[in-house]
Structures are given as structure tokens and as C-alpha cells.
Amino acid sequence: MDLLIDSFLSALLLVTSLDPEIVSIVGVSLKVSGTSTILASLIGVPFGFLVAFESFPGKRLLITCLNTLLALPTVVIGLFVYAFISRRGILGPLDLLYTQKAMVIGQTILILPVVATFTIAAISRIDGRYRKTAMTLGANRMQTAFVVFREARFGIVAAVIAAFGRVIAEVGISMMLGGNARGFTRTMTTAMALEYDKGQFSLAVALGIILLVLSFGMNLLFHFFQGRARA
Amino acid sequence: MIVYNISQLTKVYGTRTILDIPLLEIEKGLIYALLGPNGAGKTTLLNILGFLESPSTGNILFRSHPVRFSETFLQPLRKSVVMVEQHPILFTTTVQKNLEFGLKIRRIPTKERNQIVKESLDLVGMRNFAQAQAHRLSGGETQRVAIARALAANPEVLLCDEPTSSVDPENQVAIINILRQINDLKKITVVFTTHDRSQVTSLAHHSLFLDHGKLAGSPSKNFYGSNKS
């Protein structure tokens, strides 16, 4: 119990004093996770929208596949991307392994299904009368799609927030593709794993506190937007 | 002048024939009441008249031009025909922006747009609600704003699916008066569905009775109402 209390007090001191190492680690985490969230949103939102908005054969199967991908373990994605970017892989000459770019690629793959499925859910919840109303008022296909998108905006923002919440807390991809290099690819989760290995809990607990606060903030935002979407 | 000339029209869902209309003509500038029990095909007929649904077979002439049921052909036609649903839905924004939607699509300049919005809201007695959030309106107010939104688009034909079925008696009277007024003032052809025979006599020039997708007799002229033509 003493260990926990001591670690917690030292952690609070590290956080409040804005320890340079903590700032660097949090910076890398936010940069990598933020970039992968933006990339996944740029691909996943239009893709999810199209899947939900259009009718085509195999739509249900595609949604089932996307739902299955939600459960994909981070280490499997890490291994898969590693096979492509390692020296012997097709993308080996690009020298991506153990860089932030490699982490971004892996994390984007991880949250792409999250963004897409949540977007599909957000669009599917929109009342069909919006589409019909836009059409009867003379809207073309693009304008009708925009109406539906606009009505689903809070649900879509919630999808993006949920994806960021997922990616900021992942450890497998960051460790396997980033390599946990101090100042370059060390994120909050990989640093916590390392500090745990070293038996030094202060930094790990400090990062844990920041991660929890971030996750709490993300969840607050997520529920706010989901509440607006339901309203 | 004939707005719609419909011949040999059928609509089939699976094995069930929803509509089977050998001939129907709708004249410009008149009010038509469409009567019939639930499931008679009234809403389906309105959807087809609104170019929102395609018939399974048959021909439709709109303003003497044959209608081709492809999206690229139908979209421009929808600018002349607007449908107000039984339970209309307003976009989650202000009443003003709801009314502006159809006008922006028609590329009406901002100044003119504001004028049309004012006039349309005036017509339905909702001028003070321009800046109100649409989703906070009552059922009757929603129905009136939906009619104003349709009117702002300046349609040639207004289709109303049971416009008074989900509103209180006070709003029922108001809506009936609005429909009469827009027909009088703007010469807009109105086709509305209803179960209320008193509305037919007080408002419609002609009534059509649908039963199991078939028109019972030819359109009958209303000799009793105030709208005789």
C-alpha cells in the first residue's frame, strides 16, 4: 500500500512540475494518436457514410466484416504491418520501422473499423424522412447526402472521439512498430510498460494519471456528442 | 390544363398490387382530395405523383411531357412538385434555414430568399418563429412550417399526406385555410389525402376514392363546397 501511495505522490509531483520527460512522452502520444485519428477519419468517415447511405449487394456482409475487425488485437496489426515494413518486407526500403510513421500506419489500421462502424451506426440512426424531405424539396443526390451527413454530425464526431480514445490507450502497435525509443517513439503506454519492467512506478503512475484524465475527457466529449446525436 | 395524365399505372410490391389505375387526369390549379381506407395506396400514389417512387408499369405525362423514371430525369421535376408528409420532419436547425433549403437549391439570391421566407411564414401564421429551433415546435406548428417550407420552393403542385391527421382541431382549421388560401392566391394544384369527408366538401374541387389500389369511379366534382369551379 505504501508503494502505491509513494508512487502516487511522486507521480503528482512529476505531473504538476511538468517534468520534461513526461511532456515529451505525452507530446509523442498526442502527435501519433492525433495523426492516426485524423487519417482514419479522413478515410473511415466517407467510407462509413457511403456504406450506410448506399444500397448494394453484400452490404450486410461488409458491415459484419467491419464489426469483426473491431476485435482485431493490436499485436496482430503490429505483426501484419511489421511484415510489410521490416527490412525484408515490400516497404522495407522506405525505412519505416521504429518510426512514428510506422506507428501511425498501425494505429490508423486499428481504428479505421472503429470510425467506419460508428459512422455507419450514426448514419443508420438518421430518420429516413430527412432523405425524402431533401429529395422532395428538389435536392440532388449530393445535396441529399449532405443533409443526412449534417443530421448525423454529432454521431460522427462521437465516432472520431471514440477512435482517439481507443488509439491513445493502445500499447501493442506502438511497442512493435515504434520500438519505444526515448524522445522519438516513446508513448505514454509504452513508457508505462517500460517503467513497470524497471520496477520504477512513479513515472508509470504519473503517465497513468494523465492517460486516465485524457480518457475521462474523451469519454465526456463522446457522451456529450452522443447525447446530442440522440436528441 | 392537365398537369398529370396517368395511364395504365400499376405499383407492385412482391406479389401484391398496391396500385392499379387505368386512367387519371389532374387539372392545374384545382384541389383534389384523395380518400380511402388505410392501405388503399393513397401514400404510394402521392409518392409517385411526387416523383419519389417509380411505378411498376404505366405512363405518366407531367405538363404533357412523358416522365422517365430515372434519377437524373426526376430530380429537376421534383423542383415543381413538393410533398408534405403525414408526420413531416424539419431539419435540426432554425425555421428560417428550413425554409431556405429549397431556395438555396434553386439558387435564389439571399435578399430574395429572406423575402420569400417571410412571405411563406406569413401565409401559415408563423412569422414570429423564423429564428426558433425547428425541433422545439409543437406538432401543429411543425406541420405549418413544413407547408411553408414547401410553399417557399414555389411548387406547381403541392402534395399533402393527411395534413391534419396529427394536429389539434384549431390547427386543423388553420391548415385547411392555408391550403385553400395558397390555391386561391398562388393557383397551386393541391392533392391531399384524408379520412375526413367534411374536409373534402369544404376544401376540394374534386375527390378521388381509392380502394385496394383501384380508383372507385372517375374523379367526382364537389358541388357542395365553397371551392366550386
Image (cartoon, coloured by chain):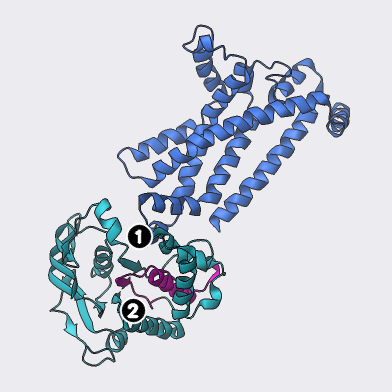
Q: Is residue B52 visible?
A: no
| Chain B colour as displayed | cyan
Residue behind mark 1: A138
In the rendered image, residue B147 lying in the magenta stretch gets the answer: yes
Residue type at numbered disc 2: Lys
Q: Residue at x 55, y 42 (%)?
A: A159
Mark 1 and mark 2 on one chain: no
Residue behind mark 2: B186
Chain under numbered label 2: B
- Determine whether B20 is above or below B175 in the image: above
Chain under numbered label 1: A
| Chain A colour as displayed | blue
> Which residue extends farthest top?
A88
Judge depth for marks 1 and 2 and give the one in front: 2
Q: Is residue A22 visible?
A: yes
- Determine whether B200 is above or below A65 in the image: below
> Could you say where residue A63 lies in the image, as x and y percent from the top left?
41, 38
* Magenta highlight range: B136-165
In the rendered image, residue B170 lying in the magenta stretch gets the answer: no
Residue type at numbered disc 1: Gly
- Determine whether A94 is above or below A56 in the image: above
Closest to the observer: B203 or B151? B151
* Residue A28 in the figure: left or right of residue A116: right
Quarter of the figure with residue A32? top right
